[in-house]
Image: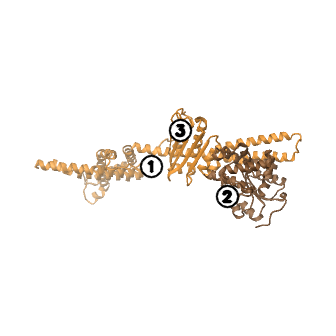
Chain colours: A orange, B brown
């Protein structure tokens, strides 16, 4: 067999488990039917009673309605939840979102009630007929023994007294039981589908999917940052030392060359080139992932960016203790992008950055510049602000831009250090 | 206190810590050609501390980022060594200019005999060797790039300095003597003294004739503002 299943696989249900499952459902359904009948007893008795005053009939009907109003939701909820649990157990716990039923919230009762109506009417009929058939078949199976001892087996409307009749009855009963066992897995699957279809709330599924998506988005961003760190490490441990080694060797050569030796100028030039390349490389590496972020945290890392800018930047770092590594990386790149936006677009002369934690589980970053404002107006699909928003979304954070034309611009980042940010 | 170190600079005994083999060997070659004796060349911070205990070197040269975690193990080892032997001259080589590392290095320690240099500086062999000797002699050498960065950062007190005074501040931080500064900037020694006096005044640091304390004051200023 070479078939591929996309989506939830429908695993075949084991036969004997299915038999017990079906038997249990039938029992529960009949019990629920009996309980409902008990609730309806006052009304039924009022209907049956021949000579009863209208007052008493009215009272009985009201009492019956009250009993049903209070009892039916309870019965439905109990039936729905036990059926859900057994269905889930039959599927090996695959049904993920157990319905929440609160008697005080009618919204949550709609589905269990709908389910119970189906189960008590349609399901109840099948359960009653099925149970009678099963019991009749069992009796039929034993009827030869009864006939041999001269006893009488009563199977529904039939009376079996002779051995040949009892043998026929036993074979029919055996066939019926065999058919019932064979059919059980299909009945069980049908019931499973009914449970899933009626009791699963679509919004629970959406919520579940959303949680999965949020986690996978956080994972993606994290793997992206891990990759950056790997690249930084490769450059730091591989390329930079080699280039530095070249520069050092040239330095040694120069030290050995007396001034004015032919070719010395070329070595000097080569050394200058090597140094310039090292400088460029250092800048590239720093932009990929700054080591100071790992060693000293967000505040000092942002200070290092600030040191390399042409505008005045003050950093007020009140983040203590340090944030989780993922949050630090994400926020670093967000602030870095914000600062480069300030330098590129705002004509600002100074920027103030405040980093603090209003509560231990909450980070607030405020970047304020005295530039010309208007940030976010020319926001493009692939622009830096969207990149920041994407990163923050992965952290469950928000980005607020207040940038009236003419300035000043205040950009605030709020992040709750939730599961997604701390994993 | 140990016996005063009066050996000729050529016989300075160095412990070198650098995890990259290529660079470690290059540095060893450079040191031996410049007249230093490398008594131990190691690749981890732990080995660095052990080697210093074993050899009692005249000078330590260490990388910042080292095994096992490749964070600032080298700096941590340097701080530990300084606590154990406050007069041990240490030169820290770094791939990056990070002010917070300088602050770490200088934090709580007597700053005499400390150097913080970009790794690139080793390519100027003569200058590098001179810097090592200055640090050994108790000088403090901070990479010009760090001081430049600090000056470029628009800080109010530093904005009060004239361009000439900034030039002087840079070479002061490198650990040069007044005479050397005068030679480098083509001015008289008296002018250098005057500039330094002005710098100290503008930075609110009491004037002092002692070279180390002068540099210490500049660095203390750097450290203070880095934290503030």
Q: Residue A6 appears at what percent x and percent y?
A: 49, 41
The residue beneath circle 2 is: B76
For marks 3 and 1, give the CA distance: 51 Å
Crowdedness near tag 1: few (<14), some (14–19) or many (≥20) residues, C-alpha within 10 Å: few
Element assignment for label 3: strand
Q: Residue A171 appears at what percent x and percent y?
A: 33, 51
For marks 3 and 2, give the CA distance: 41 Å
Q: Residue A36 appears at what percent x and percent y?
A: 26, 50
Res. B187 image quadrant: top right
The residue beneath circle 1 is: A94
Residue drawn where x is 53% and y is 38% of the image:
A408
Element assignment for label 1: loop
**Chain letter for the residue marked with disc 1 in the picture:** A
Please tell me whether residue A327 is drawn above or below residue B77 in the rendered image.
above
Residue A168 visible: no
The residue beneath circle 3 is: A409
Same chain? Circles 3 and 2: no
**Chain letter for the residue marked with disc 3 in the picture:** A
Foreground of the two, A153 or A357: A357
Foreground of the two, B191 or A155: B191
Foreground of the two, A242 or A188: A242
Please tell me whether residue B25 is drawn above or below residue B153 in the rendered image.
below
Element assignment for label 2: helix
For marks 2 and 1, give the CA distance: 52 Å
Q: Are marks 3 and 2 in contact (CB under 8 Å)?
A: no
């Amino acid at each position: 067999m070479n078939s591929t299943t996309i989506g939830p696989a429908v695993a075949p249900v084991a036969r004997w488990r299915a038999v017990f499952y079906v038997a249990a459902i039938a029992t529960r359904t009949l019990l629920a039917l009996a309980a409902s009948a008990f609730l309806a007893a006052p009304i039924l008795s009022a209907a049956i009673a021949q000579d009863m005053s209208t007052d008493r009939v009215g009272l009985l009907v009201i009492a019956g309605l009250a009993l049903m109003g209070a009892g039916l939701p309870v019965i439905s909820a109990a039936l729905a939840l036990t059926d859900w649990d057994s269905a889930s157990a039959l599927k090996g716990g695959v049904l993920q979102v157990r319905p929440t039923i609160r008697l005080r919230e009618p919204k949550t009762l709609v589905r269990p009630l709908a389910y119970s109506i189906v189960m008590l009417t349609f399901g109840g009929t099948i359960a009653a007929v099925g149970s009678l058939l099963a019991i009749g078949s069992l009796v039929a199976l034993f009827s030869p023994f009864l006939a041999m001892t001269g006893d009488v087996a009563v199977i529904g409307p039939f009376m079996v007294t002779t051995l040949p009749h009892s043998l026929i009855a036993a074979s029919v009963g055996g066939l019926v039981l065999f058919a019932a066992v064979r059919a059980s897995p299909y009945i069980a699957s049908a019931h499973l589908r009914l449970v899933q279809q009626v009791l699963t709330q679509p919004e629970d599924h959406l919520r579940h999917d959303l949680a999965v998506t949020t986690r996978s988005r956080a994972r993606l961003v994290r793997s992206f940052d891990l990759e950056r760190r790997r690249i930084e490490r490769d450059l730091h441990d591989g390329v930079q030392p080699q280039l530095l080694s070249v520069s050092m060797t040239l330095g040694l050569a120069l030290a050995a060359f007396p001034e004015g030796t032919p070719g010395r100028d070329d070595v000097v030039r080569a050394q200058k080139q090597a140094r310039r390349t090292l400088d460029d490389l250092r800048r590239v590496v720093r932009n990929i992932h700054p080591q100071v972020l790992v060693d000293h945290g967000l505040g000092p890392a942002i200070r290092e960016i600030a040191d390399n800018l042409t505008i005045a930047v003050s950093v007020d770092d009140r983040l203590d203790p340090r944030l989780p590594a993922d949050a630090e990386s994400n926020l670093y790149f967000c602030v870095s992008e914000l600062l480069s936006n300030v330098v590129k677009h705002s004509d600002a002369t100074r920027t103030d950055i405040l980093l603090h934690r209003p509560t231990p589980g909450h980070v607030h970053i405020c970047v304020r510049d005295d530039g010309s404002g208007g940030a976010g107006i020319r926001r493009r699909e692939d622009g830096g602000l969207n990149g920041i928003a994407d990163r923050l979304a992965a952290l469950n954070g928000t980005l607020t831009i207040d940038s009236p034309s003419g300035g000043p611009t205040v950009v605030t980042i709020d992040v709750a250090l939730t599961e997604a940010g701390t994993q | 206190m140990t016996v005063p170190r009066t050996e000729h600079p050529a016989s300075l005994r160095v412990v070198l810590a650098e995890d990259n083999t290529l660079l470690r060997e290059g540095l060893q070659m450079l040191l031996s050609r410049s007249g230093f004796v490398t008594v131990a060349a190691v690749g981890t911070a732990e080995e660095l501390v052990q080697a210093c205990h074993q050899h009692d070197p005249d000078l330590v040269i260490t990388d910042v980022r080292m095994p096992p975690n490749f964070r600032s193990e080298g700096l941590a080892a340097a701080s530990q060594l300084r606590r154990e032997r406050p007069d041990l001259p240490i030169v820290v080589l770094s791939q990056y200019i990070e002010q917070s590392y300088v602050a770490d290095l200088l934090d709580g320690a007597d700053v005499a005999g400390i150097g913080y240099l970009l790794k690139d500086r080793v390519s100027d062999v003569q200058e590098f060797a001179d810097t090592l000797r200055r640090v050994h002699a108790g000088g403090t050498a901070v990479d010009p790039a760090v001081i430049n960065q600090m000056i470029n950062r628009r800080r109010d007190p530093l904005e009060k300095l004239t361009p000439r005074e900034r030039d002087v501040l840079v070479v002061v931080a490198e650990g040069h003597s007044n005479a050397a500064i005068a030679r480098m900037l083509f001015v008289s020694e008296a002018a250098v003294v005057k500039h330094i006096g002005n710098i100290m005044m503008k930075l609110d640091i009491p004037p002092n004739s002692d070279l180390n304390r002068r540099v210490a004051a500049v660095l203390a200023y750097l450290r203070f503002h880095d934290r503030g």
